[in-house]
Each structure stands twice: as structure tokens, then as C-alpha cells.
Amino acid sequence: MTPLPKGENGEASVTAQTDSKELNSERVAGGILPQVLTTFDMVAIFVAIVLFITNSAAIQPAGPAAYGWWLIGFVVFLIPCAIATGQLGVMFPGEGSIYLWTHKAFGRFWGFFAGFCAWWPGVLVMVATGTLVISFLGYAFPAVNHWSVQEQGLVVVGVIVLSAVLAVLRFRVTQNLVNVVFGLYGLAILAMFVSAIVFLARGHHAAVNPWDFSQWAAGSAHGLNFTNWTFFGLVVLALLGVEVPLNMGVEIRDQRAVTRYLIWGSLVVMVAYVLATWGVMVTVHGAGNGVITNVAQAVAVGLGSAAGKVTAVVLALFFLFITVVYNYSFAPSGDVARQLGPRAGRRGVGADGDRGRVHADRVRAGAGDRGRELGQLRNQGLRHPPGRCHGDLVYLDRGPLR
């Protein structure tokens, strides 16, 4: 018989055995974070992460073959990713998505590696979205284009700071704002398509004939061939991020929302990219230059300058809120502390790096079942529950449950 391990005073003690691959967040998050995200919320987050409509302008140098590249990207990348994400999301409905799944399959190191590789581009995107805000504000208000580099840099910093402030509001308030901007974004994309219809209805010829399928031929200058393979890279980049909403997997109200958001979100993304690409291709002469503000110019050509500027402002607002979504989507993730070494534990991060992000309107200690659950979790070994408070956020140090 294997002897029982000794405690600090030499007495025998019994320690609960757990799966070595089980994260503390899997045992803790479900008892702390209420299920508040609806299917519509998940679709809005999905679109904010995946649908950068400026890619519809960036792909214009491909000419009519752009639709071929979109089709290839949808079939060989977006749809398979959605299928795999749906399966993994049902099998492992926890926080962290790609970090959690890789941890399950390959262990702690590769979980950290995959999680870091998924998280780090988000940092870069938050800088890029600031520059996109400046670009569209410059289209709507030309004086912005004459600002110095230092002044534009301050705007980028301001976007990042403002997005952080919005991200730490009560979660329902923040998500409602995201949902409203998502609706405005949809109207802006629809305006690009309607603008092209109005432009053609007035008797104008398309700037580029989108139905010229001969341009798809491999022998064409911009056809579907390996010489132009960079367009496929652009399409893949435009479709990244399918799994990001599942960073908040335990906060979904109905698990059926996992498959629903993947279906509806993927459909919205595919239709939006195709419609916007068509709108820019038909209306904007010289769109082959790939200038991102051509998506607003397309609306101006068909519906008037004022409509184009309003569209630009809506797009600037949307890119601000993309930054907000990146802030709160990636906040729950991380196994960084263990990789940083023992100092991380002294800085308030658990030994395995699982730090939770809990909005104050989600946790009401002592109120009903969730209060009792939190009290039980405290008794089971959360090291410093609740941890530091910042605004409406409560950070919990998820140490090992002893």
C-alpha cells in the first residue's frame, strides 16, 4: 500500500487527485462567471474580430479574380476553421479557446505557445486599428490629414486608452455598445452595395467589370496562379479569428450559441466581403491602388459625398470598438506566469498563470447561489479571493485548489 503523504506537522494527509492536464480555470470559471452572452452577442464579437471590411479595398488589385480568391479562402480556410472550432467548443466548453484546446492535446508548453501566438497579434491589431481610425477620420475631415506624425500618434494612443476604459465598464453595458456599433457597421457595408446598384442604375459603366471571369484564368496577369498567391495570404489574414469568441466559453448563455454564432457569423462575413468587394470594384475608378478608404469612397460615388463621410465616421467608430473587443476577449487568457518563473507568483498571478477577469456585475458575493459558490471556492483554496479590484473588475488569483 502506498503511504499517505505527510503534512507540514508530519501527520498523514489526503490530497485530492486531479487530472494533470486540467486547468484551474476549468474548475473555477464556471462557478464564478455567469452565462450572459447570447447568440447575437457572439455573432457581434465574431464579426468585430474577423470582418475587417477594409480588406475589400485591399484586394482590389486582383481585379475580378478577387472573387476567386475569396471563394478559395471560404472553402479551404473559413469553413474548415468554423467546423473545427464548433467541435472543439462543444468538447471543451471552457475559457481560453485555442489555449485550452492545445493544452488538452499537447500539454502545458504548447498550450502556452499557441495561446501566446493567438494573443500577441491582438496587441499589434490594437495599434493598427488606431491608424485605421485616423485614416477614416482623415477621409471625413480632411484637416486630419495635415496633422503631424506626433499628433496622429497621440490619437492612436488615445484610441487604445479609450478602448481600455470602455472595456472595463460593466460587461453588459460594453457589449450593448458593441452590438449597436455592429448594427451601424452592417448598415455601412450595405450602403457600399446599394451605392454600386444606384451607380449602375444611373447609366454609368462599372469601373471594373466584376463578371469578367476570363480574369480568373491562370494565364491572366491577376489570375488564380501561384504567382499571385499573396492574394490568398491576404484572404486568410482577412478570415482569421474564428475561435476568439470562445475565449469566453463559459459565459455563453446557451451552448447551442456556439454552433449558431459560427454559422451565422461565417455567413455574415462571407456575404459582407463579397458585397463590399463588388461595391468598390463597380464604383471606384483606380481602386486597384488598394487604398483602404475606397470603401467609403464607394458610398460617396453612388450616394453622395455626405453619405461617404458618414460611412467613414461609422467605420472609424467601428475600429475603435474592435479595439474594445480585443481588450475584453483576450483578457481571460494566459498561462504566461508559469513561463515567467517564480516572480510571477509574487506579483499576484497564480502558479499556473490562470488569472480570471470577473466583472463586478457578474459576481455578487453572498447573493444567492453564486455567492455561496464563491464562498465555497474561497474555502477550497483560492489564494487571495477576491483579488485586486480595478473599476468594475475583480481579479482573482486562481491558485491550485488544495
Image: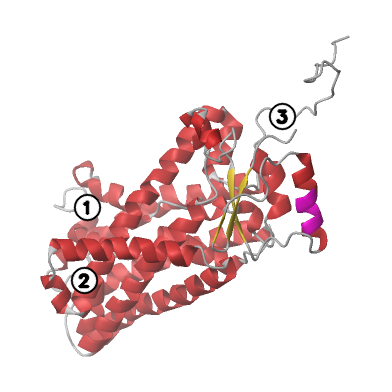
User: Which mark lies nearer to you, 1 or 2?
Assistant: 2
Badge 2: few (under 14), some or many (20 or more) residues near its Cα, within 10 Å? many
* Disc 1 element: loop
Badge 3: few (under 14), some or many (20 or more) residues near its Cα, within 10 Å? few
In the image, taking residue 319 as reference, residue 116 lies left or right, namely right
Q: Identify residue type, mark 1.
A: Ala
Q: Position of residue 232 (x, y in %)?
A: 29, 48
Q: Are marks 3 and 1 in contact (CB under 8 Å)?
A: no
Q: Position of residue 1 (x, y in %)?
A: 89, 9
Q: Identify residue type, mark 3.
A: Asp
Q: CA distance from mark 1 to mark 2?
A: 26 Å
Residue carrying label 3: 19
Residue carrying label 2: 294
Residue placed at 50% from the left, 73% from the top? 179
- Magenta region includes residue 76: no
Residue placed at 71% from the left, 42% from the top? 27
Q: Which residues are magenta?
A: 371-375
Q: Position of residue 383 (x, y in %)?
A: 67, 40
